[in-house]
Amino acid sequence: MKKRADHVAILMDGCTVWSSRRNLSPTSGLWASALAAASTIESAAQSGIRHLTLVPTDSFPLTGDSEAGLVISQLLRSHADTFRHLSLRFSARGELTQLPADLQQRLSAMETATAHELGMNLTLLLSYSGRRDILRVARDLASEVKADRLSAEGISPALIQKRLITAALPGVDLIVYTGQSHRLADALTFESAYAEFAFTDCLWPDFTPSDLQGALADFGHRERRYGKTSAQVQSPTPS
């Protein structure tokens, strides 16, 4: 039976390279990236994906009056009607207090306005690092053990997952990594343990709905093993 990816995460890499290759300003790449995000979101929702997580990986500052912050705000503003039409439920996760106040407010307003929607859950990870998130959780758990509020034996993968900023999201089925790099990024470090990966040959601003559909089609023919052997997955009884 062909499998469906219910939770897809996209690591949106290649914006800076895209601009450089075209002798364009970094700002041009940002706006092209916003267009790619809008078309990808719509395609994902129409494909039946239940959860879509977008993770910018290019290092653009999101402080003060940064261009990246402006682009994100404009994306939310200009595509608000489309999001409503698709019944999207929006949320933003990350170290959001590090963002400009006006961007924080816009993200919060969008989350509140779409909280009742029953369509695809769209999550945007901003000012985010997978390793920093794990480090934060480790320090919190260490403090609780030191204060005798938690035993060391009580620390489990499930408990760590509940403390991550992505705790409200289900496990990631498929991670699509754009940017022509076959490597991991500092994102979803803990959550990607049993996820499938799809590496594309295009930079993020060039990413199209066809690229997404290709990744979904390939995922549908993969065997999910979750750390087991193929024989164990196919066997109806424990090996």
Image: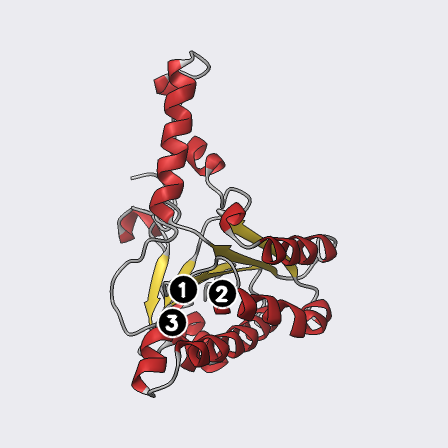
Residue 88 in picture, x, y percent from top left? 66, 63
Count of residue discs: 3
User: What amino acid type should be assigned to the residue bearing mark 1?
Assistant: Phe
Q: Label 3, secondary structure: give it.
A: helix
Q: Determine the residue positioned at 47% across, 35% down.
A: 163
Q: Does label 1 or label 2 sit earlier along the sequence?
A: 1
Please state which of residues 6 and 100 is positioned toward the viewer in this rendering.
100
Q: Determine the residue positioned at 56% across, 74% down.
A: 38
Residue holding disc 1: 60
| Front label number (3 vs 1) | 1
* Disc marking residue 66: 2
Residue 176 in picture, x, y percent from top left? 39, 66
Residue holding disc 3: 218
Q: Is residue 11 above or below residue 192?
A: below
Q: Label 2, secondary structure: give it.
A: loop
Q: Residue furthest front?
A: 64
- Position of 15 with respect to 106 (left or right) is left
User: What amino acid type should be assigned to the residue bearing mark 3?
Assistant: Asp
Q: Residue furthest bottom?
A: 22
User: What amino acid type should be assigned to the residue bearing mark 2?
Assistant: Ser
Residue 76 in picture, x, y percent from top left? 63, 67
